[in-house]
Amino acid sequence: MTTSEQSSRLLQSILDLLIPPIENLAGAGGLNLEDELHRMSTEHSKYTGVIDRSIDAITRLLGSSGLNSQVTSEVIQQFESSDPRLFELLLEIVYTAYYSDTRVHERIGWKSGALQPDGHSMPPWDESVLDIVRKREPFWTRVD
Amino acid sequence: MSVNVREPVDVLVIGSGASGAAVTWSLSEAGFSVACLEQGPWVPPSSYPTSSADWQFLQQTKWHYSPNVRKLPADYPVNDDTSQIKVVMFNAVGGSTIHWTAHVPRFHPSDFRVKTLDGVAEDWPISYFDLEPYYDLNDEMMGCSGINGDPANPPRSPRQMPPIPIGPDGERVARAFDTLGWHWWPSDVHVNSTDYKGRKACNYCGPIGQNCDRGARASSDITYIPEAIKLGAEVRPNSTIFEITTGDDGRATGANYYNANGEQEFQPANAVVVGCNGIGTPRMLLHSTSNSHPQGLLNSSGLVGKNLMFHVYAGASGFFNDLDAPTYRGPLACIIMSQEFYETDPSRDFKRGYTFQMGRGQGPAPTATGGVSWGKNHHAEFAERFGKNLGLGVIGDDLPEEINRVEIDTKLTDRHGIPAPKIIYRVGDNSKRLLAHGVNSARTVLESAGASKIISSQLNTNTGWHLMGTARMGEDPARSVVNQYGQGHDADNVFIVDGSVFVTGAAVNPTPTIQALALRTADYIRHERSDLKS
């Protein structure tokens, strides 16, 4: 197995620990989000290097066996404690990728795609909701 | 280096956001020649995140509220390492109105008299009723949805459109306020509930701060600016002013700037109107040193940059198991507000008060990144919140303190090498007590509404979108930077029209007050300063 394949496998393990499988849907690792994470990392400087630096940091925490080791929740927690800013960015990019995925949308009942032009519908404005508060006397402070 | 000199104009307006756009329109209407220079570009409505399937990613990156994250070419960095509240803004034609939520409550009459009434800060040199006609004019230009009769505020002129429907979730929270005997009212918003002036009605897609190509949410690039251009104003995007120039008499002569190609140009003008808001304006004034203004333009009092106010924010969110519809349907924060605790009450341990602004749930990624934990509890926590959360934001009056300030950073610069602003700010003791009261009250409301679980924060930190107080108005030149018309005490042809001139911040979103002040300044120039017209 090449280093790249090992890194990829480690990333999948990390992703599955962050967002585990549920019902009939794979976890974030099993959804093959790597390409999407790569796109996000390269499209904006905010996320540049976040994935690689996170893998490096976790690999260091895994010790001498490095990429061959099994990552655990405890290791992720150590990473979170040791570099909270990087971990926050990792979590943000992973959550954004996962919750932008159409398979996830289907499971949670969210309509994929742009918000416009469809928007949402709402019941019309009904003035009777004000019946109680309208009975209150004005209470703003008068000044000269 | 040769510098291109542009044709002189009567009035140079710096910034095309909420205030600069309003002044540009008003002065153009009165026949002044006006050039409005804006450091940002035109933003085509088709590029707004809501038109993209990738909107959640865009919201986190190039449409982020913070210029330090966004890092677009028009953005300047802000060193807010020494500020408890982080700065947000947008730089484009339309300024931060490109990115606002368009919630437009007005100041109360008492906000202008806090020294007299409560013994804190300073009184304003004007009253609510001096501003009232300009609030009304601004509502007509921007288009206001709302309804008269709010007992927490003075009577008002009819709004242009009925309120945005508050929805079953809004009604749920409204009923809780009713049960407690506490005030609430449908929010006044610059969002169309019906078609208005060629712009379509809102279709309730949700994240209103991300804008839409329907034009349903007003922003100055689609309200004031097109009207100003029709009247002959020139709007010049991608123009980064780095210095307002002055003559031997100390009066402004124009401004030096970098054009879209990065070349230096000079725009001569009879008067300069600054509308870069509470961070950009002091940054520019402090840069603009000269023999007449060695401490920076209009800074003989030493108060330019001082008294920075943000509004302090906190809030509570409730999770509901029994709502009729998901809470992500409808404008995010244009629903209802409460001013039960707005005015000073001597029985409380803080002066002044706060507004509750109700908020809805958001799409899946913002819900998850809003605090859902990772690991084995992730899905349960997400399910508890998604489409089921409603919030009450506490917007607190942030009393001015001179130690809260904007300075010029000695190292950080923008892409042109212009020094960046540095923010020094800490939340005051009065604000802490106010927020604690607000959070407890918010929890009471959500409990009364039937929330199954409530979480709260004592201070929200990424909320520095209201930038106020750094060039305040007043009658005494030793204690203020501009007079009641925004006119500089130190230079009678320099006017400031943005949130910098606020004496106090009140406890409401500031944009309609900024725009009303800008229109009042423009009216003053129209009627009292015909000498500025060539």
Image: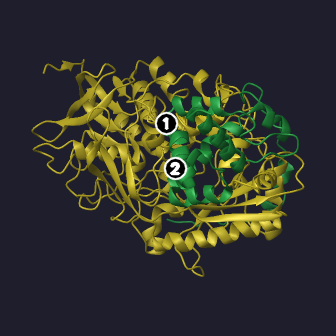
Chain colours: A green, B yellow
Question: What chain letter is assigned to the residue under label 2?
Answer: A
Residue A48, labelled with which disc?
1
Residue contact between numbered discs 1 and 2, judged by CB atoms under 8 Å? no
Whole-percent x, y for residue B352 in the image = 53, 69
* Residue drawn at 47 percent across, 74 percent down: B429
* Residue drawn at 18 percent across, 39 percent down: B251
Q: Hey, which residue is sitting farthest bottom in the picture?
A: B347
Residue B393 or residue B409, whichever sits in front: B409
Q: Which label lies toward us, 1 or 2?
A: 2
Q: For residue B451, what is the image quadrant?
A: bottom right
Whole-percent x, y for residue B260 in the image = 34, 21
A109 sits left or right of B492 in the view: right
Residue type at mark 1?
Thr
Between the residue at mark 1 and the residue at mark 2, the CA separation in whole angstroms equals: 15 Å
Find numbered disc 1 in the image and state the secondary structure of the residue it sits on: loop
Q: For residue B479, what is the image quadrant?
A: bottom left
The N terminus of chain A sits in image quarter:
top right
Residue B331 seen anywhere in this rendered image of the structure: no
* Residue drawn at 86 percent across, 51 percent down: A128
A123 sits left or right of B19 in the view: right
Disc with the residue nearer the chain's start (1 vs 2): 1
Q: Identify the residue position indicated by label 2 in the image.
A: A57
Residue type at mark 2?
Ala
B245 sits left or right of B330 in the view: left
Residue B312 or residue B244, whichever sits in front: B312
Question: What chain letter is assigned to the residue under label 1?
Answer: A
The vertical placement of B452 against B107, above or below, is below
Residue A144 or residue A59, whichever sits in front: A59
Crowdedness of circle 2 by 10 Å Cα count: few (<14), some, many (20+)?
some
* Residue drawn at 42 percent across, 35 percent down: B20
Residue B235 or residue A3, whichever sits in front: A3
